Image: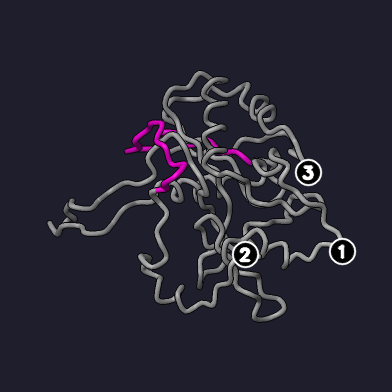
Amino acid sequence: MLVRAIKTRSILPPKDDLLSAITESFSNIKLKEKSIIVITSKVVSIWQGRCLKIDNKINKDKFIKKEADLYLDRVRPNDVMLTIKDGVLIPTAGIDESNANGYYVLWPKDLFKTAKEMYGFIQKKFKLKSFGIIISDSHTTPMTTGIMGLGISFYGFYPLRDYRGKKDIFKRKIKMSQTNIVDSLAAAAVYEMGEGAEQTPIAIIEEVGDIKFGKFNFLKTNPLEIKMQDDIYYPLLKSINWKKKI
């Protein structure tokens, strides 16, 4: 598998033309069939104008509560507010201030519709037939230091590799395991893109094995999303006093 980050011009809040930046950055690149193109959510949000100027009149906590689907109040003053947004457990409803030039940058709206729109633009512009799009962000893993990438939406391929019913090396039948392809690829891409001043908000992944490419419809049902009561972490999640968005 080959992962390479793609440098772009600065994509500036509160609103900028991401599609022209992609066109410019891909002009000297030969895109290959069956590639996965990963685009960080921040530049997608800027493209959509999902930015809010930071000033003293804005209560960030109140704003987070409005953007989140569920939220947990801060326990200590310096705690980050824990939220669930679009089925993802993530701090501050995804609102970010880094590389934002004095703005709060929100998560993109209509995540799967937007991924499909990005797919359609790249397919038409660069004449690809089989490829995938991932919109990525960074998150933390409980009990572990550091951040890593995850995919918050995708289009153009099926997101799971299913091992259920197959046998392991000792001939034991596998009952539950499915590989989350989206987050696995997003983690590799975000590592290459970086988190600082690299100015590489896009990555191209080539030679990815065992991917089912196709125009699957995930606008209503996301195969990666699981109901809270069915999650293996439900005993922990149910003990949290979640509050609904205001």
Q: Could you tell me which residue is drawn at 76 percent across and 39 percent down?
A: 15
Q: Secondary structure at mark 1?
A: loop
Q: Which residue is tagged 1?
A: 56
Dot 2 amino acid type: Lys
Q: Secondary structure at mark 2?
A: loop
Q: Amino acid at mark 3?
A: Pro
Front-most of residues 146 and 45? 45
Q: Amino acid at mark 1?
A: Asn
Residue 238 horizontal/vertical position (percent): 45, 75
What residue did someone put label 2 on? 245
Is mark 3 in CB contact (under 8 Å) with mark 2?
no
Q: Are marks 1 and 2 in contact (CB under 8 Å)?
A: no
Magenta residue check for 207: yes
Of the two numbered discs 1 and 2 on the same chain, state the one appearing first in sequence: 1
Q: CA distance from mark 1 to mark 2?
A: 22 Å
Q: Secondary structure at mark 3?
A: loop
**In the rendered view, would you say 156 is above or below 175?**
above
Residue at 12% across, 56% down: 171
Q: Residue furthest bottom?
A: 76
In the shown orientation, is residue 143 left or right of residue 178?
Answer: right
First-in-chain label (3 vs 1):
3
When asked about the image quadrant of residue 97, the answer is: bottom right
Q: Residue at x 47, y 41 (%)?
A: 219
- In the image, the segment drawn in magenta is 201-222
Asked which quadrant contains residue 122, the reply is top right
> Is residue 240 in the magenta section?
no
Q: Residue 183 appears at what percent x and percent y?
A: 46, 50
